[in-house]
Image: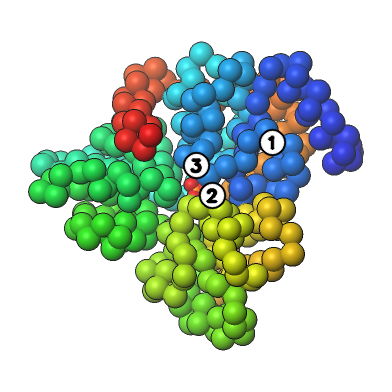
Amino acid sequence: ALSTEELLRRVEALKKEMNAIVLAHYYTLPEIQQAADIVGDSLALARAAEKTSADVIVFAGVYFMAETAKILNPGKMVLMPDPGAGCPLADSCPEDEFRAFREAHPDAIAITYVNSTAAIKKLSDIICTSSNAVHIVRQILPEQQIIFGPDRNLGAWVMKQTGRDMLLWQGFCYVHEAYSEVYMIQAKAMHPGAELIAHPECRQEVLRHASFVGSTSALLNYTASSSSQSFIVATEPGILYEMEKRSPGKTFIPAPKDPANPRSVCKQMKQNTLDKLYLCMVNRSPEITVDEQLREGALKSIKRMLEMSA
Ligand code: 13P
Ligand code: SF4
């Protein structure tokens, strides 16, 4: 097997040869983040995919992220190390059921979290991410009814921030849903002086105890600029790699798992290994493709997000 250093060197050479850009999410493995040209949250990665002049986009994240990159760049080749890395939250919202949900509320507009399939995006009016959801909802007229899905926790948090009532789809992320209130209270008691920070995919009873709530990029910026020296981090622990890199000397404690529900790692993000990244570039496969009608339908709601969050 090739060493990590050798694989990184070869990926670097392939990027030049192919005019490729490697985009990675903060939850991927450290060596993947090292190989990436841009590491970011969902919004930053979608923007990078929209702006790049590269011919090939290699996306180390989960399927909906690479699919969004392809929707924005039909003429570019989008590769993914392992297209089997789906987001279970996105996959928890079937097209038929979502259509029926919309039909039951014909006057409502649908604002949909980017963690969704292209088919759901096509059925939606505006896409949002955790970093622009509040900003987008605030631009909707107060009398307008809103359907929000698929993440009920992000939806509830946006409702609290904006004072708006929204009809929520009852999906959740298994990683963030696994954090529970009692362990957060315990962790704060065990680490007095450490600030609890959390991603809005956590449940409301967890978010209540956090001093800062935001997307992965917002959490990172917060830890880098805050005067606090230690943080209990209630989001996928892959982000600790970049937090420690940006704030050497500060202490980052992964939020404790509930022993009865110990799933706080996103298995799908970790399916992006460095060998698979290297191989997908060598083979120019697996390539992500999106049916043209589906792409056009989904593009409308993604474009609205990019315009509204400018
Ligand atoms: P961010 O947009 O905050 O990076 O979130 C992506 C995600 O999948 C969170 O679980
Ligand atoms: Fe999906 Fe949760 Fe993994 Fe994010 S952390 S990609 S929402 S399963």
- Foreground: disc 2 or disc 1: 2
Q: Is mark 1 on a helix, strand or loop?
A: loop
Display colour scheme: rainbow
Residue 91 is left or right of residue 55, and the answer is left
Q: Does the residue labelled 1 lie within 8 Å of ligand 1?
A: no
Is the residue indicated by label 2 positioned so its CB lies within 8 Å of ligand 1? yes
User: Which of the two discs, 3 and 2, labels the residue nearer the N terminus?
Assistant: 3
Residue closer to the observer: 295 or 57: 57
The answer to whether residue 210 of the structure is visible from this angle is yes
Element type where label 2 sits in the image: helix
Sequence-wise, which precedes: disc 2 or disc 1?
A: 1
The picture places residue 176, in percent across and down from the top left corner, at 49, 62
Examine the rendered structure and indicate whether residue 126 appears above or below residue 155.
above
Q: How far, Cα to Cα, is label 3 from label 1?
A: 15 Å
* Mark 3 close to ligand 1, CB under 8 Å: yes
Cα distance, mark 2 to mark 1? Answer: 16 Å
Mark nearer the N terminus (3 vs 1): 1
Residue of label 2: 217
- Residues at badges 2 and 1 in contact (C-beta under 8 Å)? no
Q: Name the residue under label 1.
A: 36
Q: How crowded is mark 3: few (under 14 residues within 10 Å), some or many (20 or more)?
A: many
Under tag 3, what secondary structure? Answer: helix
Mark 3 is on which residue type? Ser
Q: Where is residue 67 in the image (x, y as percent from the top left)?
A: 49, 31
Q: In this view, does 241 lie above or below 208?
A: above
Amino acid of disc 1? Ala
Residue at (48%, 59%) from the top-left corner? 199
Indicate the amino acid at tag 2: Ser
